[in-house]
Amino acid sequence: GKVIAEYKGIFGKELKNADFTFTINQNKSLKQYSEEIFFIPNSKGTIMGYLASGLEAAIINPQAKIIGISFKDYNAPKARDILQTLSEVYRIKSVEIKNRANKQKQEYLDSQIEKTEKELNSYETQMEKFIIENKTNNVEAKIGELV
């Protein structure tokens, strides 16, 4: 019931102060509201506690890698929006993790190919040197003779 700070601005324009920067976008008509609109900024810890208290997650099908998530709140549209956001963040993070794993695999395979190329080049040089020193193209016969 006590106003700590008051800021006036325009929808879609950034508001700044020493503590925060934010933009309020008008998604619906505000004509339906007869009283002032206000909000209370909360700390990250408070928000995380609120989300954790209403969130439930369970593995539905481990083979198909399906999980179920639910969020309980008195405001159904808010709960739906939270679940949609969580689902999208989970999808994005999953793709990032898969991409990182694929990149690491590719880097490993590239390094193995490079190592193998160097070894093959070394063997090729040794073979050329052997052929020149022993003046023969028939390496197998010459090796048998030397043995």
Image (cartoon, grey):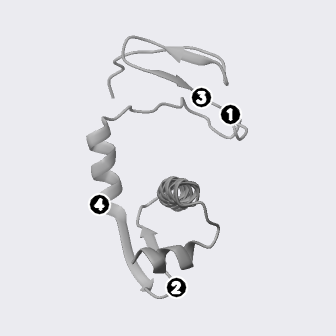
- Mark 3, secondary structure of its residue: loop
Q: Is residue 100 visible?
A: no
- The amino acid type found where label 3 is placed reads Ile
Q: Which mark is residue 64?
A: 2
How crowded pointer 1 is (Cα within 10 Å; few <14, some 14-19, many 20+) is rated as few
Residue 11, position as x, y percentages in the image: 66, 24
Left or right, 77 with reference to 43: right
Q: Is residue 60 visible?
A: yes
Dividing the picture into quarters, in which one does residue 147 lie? Answer: bottom left
Q: Are marks 3 and 1 in contact (CB under 8 Å)?
A: yes
Left or right, 147 with reference to 83: left
Q: Label 4 to label 2, Cα distance in Å?
A: 27 Å
How crowded pointer 3 is (Cα within 10 Å; few <14, some 14-19, many 20+) is rated as few
Q: Which residue is mark 1?
A: 26
How crowded pointer 4 is (Cα within 10 Å; few <14, some 14-19, many 20+) is rated as few
Q: Label 2 to label 1, Cα distance in Å?
A: 40 Å
Q: Which mark is residue 24?
A: 3
